[in-house]
Image (cartoon, rainbow, N blue to C red):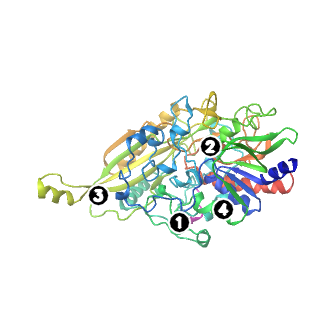
Amino acid sequence: MANFNIDSKKARTYDAIVIGSGISGGWSAKELTEKGLKTLVLERGRDVQHIKDYPTTNMMPWEFAHRERLPKEITDANPIASRCYNFKESSAHFFAKDNEHPYVQEKPFDWIRGYQVGGKSLLWARQTQRWSKYDFEGPARDKFAVEWPIGYDDIAPWYSHVEKFAGITGNKDGIDTLPDGEFLAPHDLNCVEKYFKEQVGKQYKDRHIIIGRAAHITDPQQIHLDQGRAKCQHRVICERGCPFGGYFSSNSSTIPWAMKTGNLTMRPHSVVHSIIYDDKKQKATGVRVIDANTKQMMEFYADIIFVNAAALNSNLVLLNSTSSRFPNGLGNDSGVLGKYVAFHNYRASVSGEYEGFLDSTTDGKRPNSGYIPRFRNVYKQETDFLRGYAAGFGANRNTYSDRNGLGESLKSNLHETKYGNWSVGSHMMGETIPKESNYVALDKDLKDPFGIAQLKISVGYDDNDEKMIKDYVEQVSEMFTNAGFKNVKSHDGNRNPGNDIHEMGGVRMGKDPKTSMLNQWNQLHACKNVFVTDGACMTSTSTQNPSLTYMALSARAVDYAVKQMKAKNL
């Protein structure tokens, strides 16, 4: 029997374990397996294989029982997921269901989750901007959080590394607050968007309108063809899963690439309970897992562990990983684990109309939009709030039909679609300040269906966010008005924190182990063979979409970890 146990443990031992298979987990797995490490990826949800498991990807609108609208009983059962723009009849199967995965909201927080192989990489909005040196220097300059232990120059080569493989479309715009990258052919602004770009350029020296940078293959390179991916078809139904691999996802790109090395073992239905810490060895030795189907607890072992469970679940896993050495969570000597959580503020939008270009309209679909890079408080403090905001921008031609008449005349009128003015719109993406009072913790009483303590979330807006909203509305309304747009209106959607799906922090990087969890290599200060490279590691949030930075940090951390392992330092 003893030999049987030894053999069983050997069969459950790998060089590396990755917790989570979303955007950062997929990258960790790709890099580890390419470097020759036998790697186990633990995914709490079901398996989703590229193409095979995209059941709605080729369905026409009329083939859905409810024309893509979900029945009331489903939206009532999922009040949080229902507030996400992508929760539709065609994509609801990629969202975690609210009643199956409870959590505690000390303050309203929409925790949007995707529990399957690939995670939320199947559902993301695919906007991929690099951070600039100003973003990494911001906390040190403004004193609103601890200093980042890295700068732009440290991560720039890794941005290039992931951009070439993932496929990023964009222009080289030459804007120092938004560094250029390794771009494929850009999408194009339409005529009204170009008009707005010209007007803004004439009137503001520090403001720019550009086409968004997005993870879509517009000009396939050999590395993309080698992945089995093809050019984006501009179908704009990305949230169903793309059988062409036209946009980047773990399912179409990093996971199958890792699988081809022969070094990857994927284990779906594996709910991570905690990381095992060995007091004698003074290192983590493995991961405790609850099989989602059998509810059986089992253990897997490895020399290196990458935590990529998505920001808040990565916090949960570390908080639940207690031992005599770490009674308050793995690596939590500083006491900051779970604290300084932040997000992006998407509450405000501005709309208007333009009466020009009535001889033009748009044709086809574009899986991207215009973008206004941050222009507030970059080089100096200009306002009564800290940091700044970026914004989306787009223009579309309105259509309408005459609904007058009766019988044949009404039918004829309804069939005759007419074009109205152009509608223009913008939404903000504001940086929020990581604060100790914005935290997550384990609830002392409530358990989830697997017997693990539920995550308690206490994250809210503050006065800085309200001042930033006011400034965004004033500035963009002014830009719209100066461009000659009419009927300019602003709107506060009052959306809850979390609905941006950009939650970050809780396991932040930093120079000082007394005030941070991770060093400059995303390595736990107090447990050197554990790395965290998803949104949990972020020290501040910038105004850019964060996923590209998670990818680059993951690849960079793996490179360091493998070198350290080979040098026998882990």
Part of the protein shown in magenta: 179-183
Q: Along the polypeptide, which appears first: circle 2 or circle 4?
A: 4
Q: Is residue 539 visible?
A: no
Left or right of residue 369, residue 28 in this image: right
Left or right of residue 280, residue 538 in this image: left
Q: In this figure, which residue is indicated by the disc labeled 1?
A: 217
How far separated are the C-alphas under marks 3 and 1?
A: 33 Å
Give the structural element (helix, strand or loop) at label 4.
helix
Image: 32 above or below 71? below
- Which of pointers 1 and 4 indicates the residue nearer the eye? 1
The amino acid sitting under disc 2 is Ala
- Kindly report the secondary structure that dominates the magenta region of the rendered protein: loop
Q: Do the CB atoms of the residues marked 1 and 2 lie less than 8 Å apart?
A: no
Give the structural element (helix, strand or loop) at label 2.
helix
- Which of pointers 1 and 2 indicates the residue nearer the eye? 2
Q: Nearer the viewer, residue 384 or 296?
A: 296
Q: In this figure, which residue is indicated by the disc labeled 2?
A: 311
Marker disc for residue 55: none
Residue 263: x, y in percent? 73, 62
Q: Along the polypeptide, which appears first: circle 1 or circle 4?
A: 4
How far separated are the C-alphas under marks 1 and 2?
A: 27 Å
Q: In this figure, which residue is indicated by the disc labeled 3?
A: 356
Give the structural element (helix, strand or loop) at label 1.
loop
* Within-10-Å neighbours for mark 2: few <14, some 14–19, many 20+: many
How far separated are the C-alphas under marks 2 and 3?
A: 45 Å
